[in-house]
Image (cartoon, grey):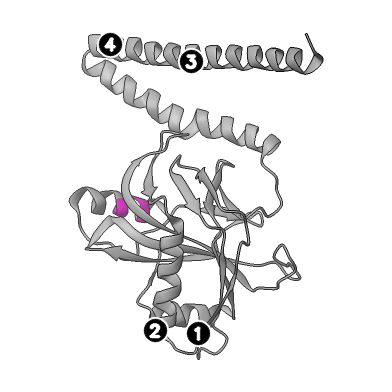
Amino acid sequence: MSAPETHRRRWSARIAIDWFFFIFAGLAAIWLAYLSFTETLSLGWWGIAGGILFWALLAYLVLPRLHRILTTIYVPEYFIGRARTSDGLLGDPVNLAFMGVEEQLHAVMREARWTRADPVTPRSSWRIVTATLTRRSYDEAPVSPLFLFGRQQDFAYQQEVAGNPAQRHHVRFWRCPDGWLLPGGRRVDWVAAGTFDTAVGLSLFTLQITHRIDADTDVERDHIVKTVTDADPRVAVDVIRDFSSGYHARNGGGDSIRTDGDLPIVDVRGVTS
């Protein structure tokens, strides 16, 4: 038997073993969840309360801590065109860049009928929970923090859909560090990540309550560009084609995302703040 054939068989055996343990672990986890659920029911109301407490500890303490440890090992700190969650997971794609000062950005976003999101505080968090449950409008609802350049977004804007805070267009902005250049050498003042929230659900990776986003992030990117260019004819747009390779992936909440990799650079320097 030739060496390449032996090598292929060895790798095939390894893949088969990996898949066996992967499936076995998945089935074991499902069985454990089933046992936990049935045991919880047998304890009555105390069991339900214990189950909720177990979920809260798992979703907001154990899994985030585990992700922070692991992502410090395998997720690079340098710019790769993706924001990161507070747990270190890769978040939404960076799909926009802007030229201009902060006052001009605020001016053009207001012209385009975007609303600046409130910062995340206990009060604003409680308000978005109650607004979502009661389906009451909350135009300034906060967006969760995502991190780039080692810090969370400087600010965010959103457009609520049909008075329902569970569905909204939103975009986060980060000021670029002094002297920082895009891969390829282009200088910009801001980068941004725009996505569309479709509903409220659970994160696939942490089990936390979060917004789910639409997979086609290019549609939201193009919507943002269209709203600002329609609002002010002084806004210019230059697109870097294939800034990143087109890809299919998942964000920090486990939602599928896809993009063609183009990066519009929106120039708002002609806007009067």
Residue 197 position within the rendered picture, expressed as x and y whole percent measured from the top left? 36, 54
Would you say residue 120 is visible in this rendering? no
> Distance from label 4 to label 1 (Cα)?
60 Å
Q: Which of marks 4 and 1 is in front?
A: 1
Question: Does residue 182 appear left or right of residue 136 in this picture?
Answer: right
Looking at marks 4 and 2 on the same chain, the residue that comes earlier in the sequence is marked by 4
Q: Regarding mark 3 in the picture, which secondary structure is present there?
A: helix
Residue pointed to by mark 3: 23
> Distance from label 3 to label 4 (Cα)?
23 Å
Residue pointed to by mark 4: 38
Residue 187 position within the rendered picture, expressed as x and y whole percent measured from the top left? 70, 73
Q: Relative to 112, does residue 171 appear above or below in the rendering?
A: above
Q: Which of 273 and 232 is in front in this view?
A: 232
User: At label 1, which amino acid type do we have?
Assistant: Val
User: At label 3, which amino acid type do we have?
Assistant: Ile
> Distance from label 3 to label 1 (Cα)?
53 Å
Q: Do the residues labelled 2 and 1 touch (CB within 8 Å)?
A: yes
Residue pointed to by mark 2: 231
Q: Does the magenta stretch include residue 126?
A: yes
Looking at marks 2 and 3 on the same chain, the residue that comes earlier in the sequence is marked by 3
> Distance from label 4 to label 2 (Cα)?
57 Å
Looking at marks 3 and 4 on the same chain, the residue that comes earlier in the sequence is marked by 3
Residue pointed to by mark 1: 235
Looking at marks 3 and 1 on the same chain, the residue that comes earlier in the sequence is marked by 3
Q: Which residue is drawn at 45% across and 27% down?
A: 58
